[in-house]
Amino acid sequence: MNGGVESLFSLEGRVAVVTGATGVLGGAMARGLARAGARVGVLGRREGRVQEMAREISGAGGGAMALPADVLDEGQLRGAREAVLDRWGRLARIIHERLRRPAKGRAINVAPDAPRPGACGPSSPAP
Protein backbone atom coordinates (compact mmCIF):
# COMPACT_ATOMS: atom_id res chain seq x y z
CA MET A 1 0.00 0.00 0.00
CA ASN A 2 1.20 3.51 -0.75
CA GLY A 3 1.87 6.12 1.93
CA GLY A 4 -0.19 9.26 2.37
CA VAL A 5 -3.95 9.33 2.67
CA GLU A 6 -4.31 5.65 1.70
CA SER A 7 -2.28 4.61 4.76
CA LEU A 8 -4.69 6.52 7.00
CA PHE A 9 -7.69 4.71 5.57
CA SER A 10 -6.47 1.19 4.90
CA LEU A 11 -8.91 -1.17 3.21
CA GLU A 12 -6.61 -4.21 3.38
CA GLY A 13 -8.67 -7.39 3.27
CA ARG A 14 -11.88 -5.59 2.22
CA VAL A 15 -13.79 -6.39 -0.94
CA ALA A 16 -15.72 -3.77 -2.91
CA VAL A 17 -17.62 -3.70 -6.19
CA VAL A 18 -17.82 -0.45 -8.16
CA THR A 19 -20.64 -0.12 -10.71
CA GLY A 20 -19.81 2.11 -13.64
CA ALA A 21 -16.14 1.39 -12.99
CA THR A 22 -15.20 1.92 -16.63
CA GLY A 23 -16.13 5.61 -16.52
CA VAL A 24 -13.97 8.48 -15.33
CA LEU A 25 -15.44 8.77 -11.82
CA GLY A 26 -16.05 5.04 -11.29
CA GLY A 27 -12.56 4.21 -12.56
CA ALA A 28 -11.01 6.71 -10.16
CA MET A 29 -13.00 5.14 -7.31
CA ALA A 30 -11.94 1.61 -8.27
CA ARG A 31 -8.27 2.62 -8.54
CA GLY A 32 -8.41 4.47 -5.21
CA LEU A 33 -10.01 1.52 -3.42
CA ALA A 34 -7.32 -0.78 -4.84
CA ARG A 35 -4.51 1.61 -3.81
CA ALA A 36 -5.96 1.57 -0.29
CA GLY A 37 -5.71 -2.23 -0.27
CA ALA A 38 -9.22 -3.37 -1.22
CA ARG A 39 -9.87 -6.11 -3.72
CA VAL A 40 -12.12 -4.53 -6.34
CA GLY A 41 -14.85 -5.94 -8.54
CA VAL A 42 -14.95 -3.81 -11.70
CA LEU A 43 -18.57 -3.83 -12.86
CA GLY A 44 -19.83 -2.34 -16.11
CA ARG A 45 -21.82 -3.12 -19.25
CA ARG A 46 -18.94 -3.01 -21.75
CA GLU A 47 -16.98 -6.22 -21.30
CA GLY A 48 -13.84 -5.00 -23.08
CA ARG A 49 -13.63 -1.88 -20.92
CA VAL A 50 -14.32 -3.91 -17.76
CA GLN A 51 -11.50 -6.33 -18.61
CA GLU A 52 -9.15 -3.43 -19.42
CA MET A 53 -9.82 -1.67 -16.10
CA ALA A 54 -9.36 -4.89 -14.10
CA ARG A 55 -6.04 -5.52 -15.89
CA GLU A 56 -4.92 -1.95 -15.19
CA ILE A 57 -5.64 -2.30 -11.46
CA SER A 58 -4.00 -5.74 -11.30
CA GLY A 59 -0.98 -4.46 -13.25
CA ALA A 60 -0.51 -1.73 -10.65
CA GLY A 61 -0.39 -4.37 -7.91
CA GLY A 62 -4.05 -4.29 -6.84
CA GLY A 63 -6.55 -7.10 -6.62
CA ALA A 64 -9.27 -6.81 -9.24
CA MET A 65 -11.75 -8.91 -11.14
CA ALA A 66 -13.82 -8.04 -14.19
CA LEU A 67 -17.58 -8.23 -13.72
CA PRO A 68 -19.36 -7.46 -16.99
CA ALA A 69 -22.99 -6.78 -16.02
CA ASP A 70 -25.86 -4.35 -16.45
CA VAL A 71 -27.21 -2.89 -13.18
CA LEU A 72 -30.74 -3.29 -14.54
CA ASP A 73 -30.38 -7.05 -15.05
CA GLU A 74 -30.97 -8.88 -11.77
CA GLY A 75 -29.58 -12.16 -13.12
CA GLN A 76 -26.34 -10.51 -14.19
CA LEU A 77 -25.99 -8.78 -10.81
CA ARG A 78 -26.61 -12.01 -8.93
CA GLY A 79 -24.02 -13.71 -11.14
CA ALA A 80 -21.52 -10.95 -10.39
CA ARG A 81 -22.18 -11.29 -6.65
CA GLU A 82 -21.66 -15.06 -6.85
CA ALA A 83 -18.39 -14.59 -8.76
CA VAL A 84 -17.09 -12.19 -6.09
CA LEU A 85 -18.15 -14.47 -3.23
CA ASP A 86 -16.69 -17.55 -4.95
CA ARG A 87 -13.34 -15.83 -5.50
CA TRP A 88 -12.94 -13.70 -2.37
CA GLY A 89 -15.46 -15.20 0.08
CA ARG A 90 -17.14 -11.93 0.98
CA LEU A 91 -18.32 -8.56 -0.23
CA ALA A 92 -18.14 -5.62 2.15
CA ARG A 93 -19.04 -2.65 -0.08
CA ILE A 94 -20.94 -1.86 -3.27
CA ILE A 95 -20.28 1.57 -4.73
CA HIS A 96 -23.00 2.59 -7.17
CA GLU A 97 -21.28 5.16 -9.34
CA ARG A 98 -23.45 4.53 -12.35
CA LEU A 99 -27.20 4.19 -12.12
CA ARG A 100 -29.56 4.78 -14.99
CA ARG A 101 -32.23 7.44 -14.81
CA PRO A 102 -35.57 6.19 -13.43
CA ALA A 103 -37.22 6.84 -16.81
CA LYS A 104 -35.06 4.12 -18.35
CA GLY A 105 -35.45 1.62 -15.52
CA ARG A 106 -34.50 1.06 -11.93
CA ALA A 107 -31.41 -0.50 -10.44
CA ILE A 108 -31.72 -3.86 -8.74
CA ASN A 109 -30.51 -4.06 -5.13
CA VAL A 110 -28.48 -7.22 -4.57
CA ALA A 111 -27.36 -6.74 -0.98
CA PRO A 112 -23.81 -7.89 -0.20
CA ASP A 113 -25.01 -9.52 3.01
CA ALA A 114 -27.89 -11.44 1.44
CA PRO A 115 -27.99 -15.02 2.70
CA ARG A 116 -25.75 -17.43 0.85
CA PRO A 117 -24.83 -20.84 2.23
CA GLY A 118 -21.24 -20.97 3.44
CA ALA A 119 -20.43 -17.30 2.74
CA CYS A 120 -18.88 -14.93 5.23
CA GLY A 121 -20.82 -11.82 6.18
CA PRO A 122 -19.41 -8.33 5.71
CA SER A 123 -17.76 -8.21 9.13
CA SER A 124 -16.53 -11.80 9.23
CA PRO A 125 -12.94 -12.66 8.43
CA ALA A 126 -12.31 -14.13 4.99
CA PRO A 127 -11.80 -17.91 4.92
Image (cartoon, rainbow, N blue to C red):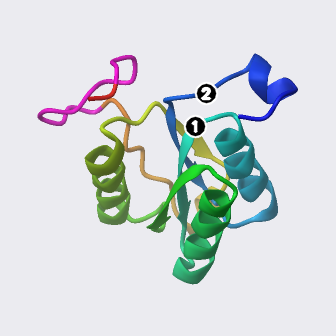
Image x and y of residue 12, in percent: 57, 28
Residue 11, numbered circle:
2
User: Looking at the picture, which amino acid does disc 1 mark?
Assistant: Ala
Q: Earlier in the sequence, mark 1 or mark 2?
A: 2
88 to 126, vertically: above or below: below
Image x and y of residue 102, in percent: 60, 57
Image quarter of the N terminus: top right
Tell me the residue at 67%/23% (across/down).
Answer: 10
Does residue 101 show up?
Answer: no
Does residue 56 show up?
Answer: yes
User: Secondary structure beneath disc 1?
Assistant: loop
32 to 105, vertically: above or below: above
Residue extending farthest to the bottom is 48
In the rendered image, residue 126 lying in the magenta stretch gets the answer: no
Query: Magenta segment range?
Result: 114-125
Is the Cβ of the residue at disc 1 closer than 8 Å to that at disc 2? yes
| 104 with respect to 73 (left or right) | right
Tell me the residue at 51%/56% (across/down).
Answer: 106
Tell me the residue at 30%/38% (across/down).
Answer: 89
Tell me the residue at 67%/40% (across/down).
Answer: 33
Image x and y of residue 124, in percent: 33, 18
Residue 38, numbered circle:
1
User: Looking at the picture, which amino acid does disc 2 mark?
Assistant: Leu
Quarter where residue 91 is shown: top left
Quarter where residue 80 is shown: bottom left
29 to 7, vertically: above or below: below
Q: Main secondary structure of the magenta part?
A: loop
106 to 111, vertically: above or below: below
| 110 with respect to 96 (left or right) | left
Residue 49 versus residue 97: which sits nearer the camera?
A: 49
